[in-house]
Image (cartoon, helix red, strand yellow):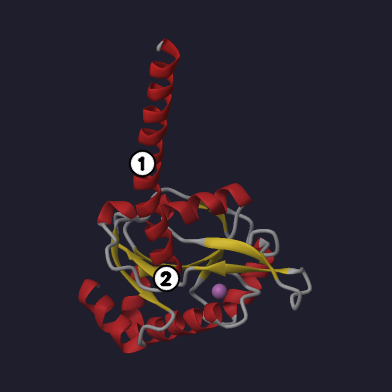
Amino acid sequence: MRLDRRLVIVVVLGLMVGAAAALFSLPGLRERLSTASGPIASVGKAQVGGPFSLVDPAGRKVTDKDFLGRYMLVYFGFTFCPDVCPTGLQVMASALDQLGPKADRIAPLFITLDPERDTPQQMGEYVKAFHPRILGLTGTSAEIAEVARAYRVYFKKVTDEKSTAGYTVDHTSIMYVMDTKGEFVAHFTHATAVDAIVSRLQKLL
Ligand code: NI
């Protein structure tokens, strides 16, 4: 009798834990899936962005505080990316050019998701081929993981036999606009038309 009751309690507790786990894991899974593929439908102000500490091509420490007072255009990727990142950076560069002098109020950042290969020097060399004003930032694996988490960027190292390093990085391709206080304003992707980005930014600047 006593044993039976204990068994019932264990089973009921088990079911409750299982149900709770299912409830919690579902939204998490859905969120991961939505951030992995292009535009996000619901990005709240408080949900995207936050403090970061990274390194510029000259090896200097750079934090989010350095950009307060300017808008940030933040794009994540990596220099060995075969097509998406170059497209995104090209779009960013064209938008900056079309904005003209107004672009001075924007800090365009390219943050690597492959800190192993993307040294400060590599970032500098790569980014300057797109636009002289884009700042390439890298950091330790922990620093990159932290900034990616803050910006809700999904990335994952995956095996790639075609790459000399044996891997590539799957990642979200989102360009975030953050305001002068570092708060999220808008986002684009590498596939957003340059004109659309320019007109959105012109309204802000
Ligand atoms: Ni890429």
Residue behind label 1 places its C-beta within 8 angstroms of ligand 1: no
Q: Amino acid at mark 1?
A: Ala
The spot of residue 185 in percent (x, y) is 27, 64
Q: Is residue 170 left or right of residue 191?
A: right
Frontmost residue, 9 versus 45: 9
Can residue 140 be seen at all in this image of the molecule? Answer: no
Frontmost residue, 113 versus 27: 27
Determine the CA span between mark 2 and mark 1: 34 Å
The quarter of the image holding the N terminus is top left
Q: Amino acid at mark 2?
A: Ile
Residue 42: name its quadrant: bottom left
The first of marks 2 and 1 along the sequence is 1
The spot of residue 44 in percent (x, y) is 26, 57
Residue 119: name its quadrant: bottom right
Which label belongs to residue 68? Answer: none
Q: Residue at the location (58% across, 75% down)?
A: 127
- Ligand 1 is found in the corner quadrant, namely bottom right
The quarter of the image holding the C terminus is bottom left
For mark 2, give the secondary structure: strand
Residue wearing tag 1: 19
Is 182 above or below relative to 15? below
The spot of residue 72 in percent (x, y) is 38, 65
The spot of residue 45 in percent (x, y) is 26, 56
Q: Is residue 159 left or right of residue 144?
A: right
User: Dot 1: within a 10 Å radius of its alpha carbon, few (fewer than 14), some, or many (20 or more) residues?
Assistant: few
Is 156 above or below relative to 199? above
Which label belongs to residue 174? Answer: 2
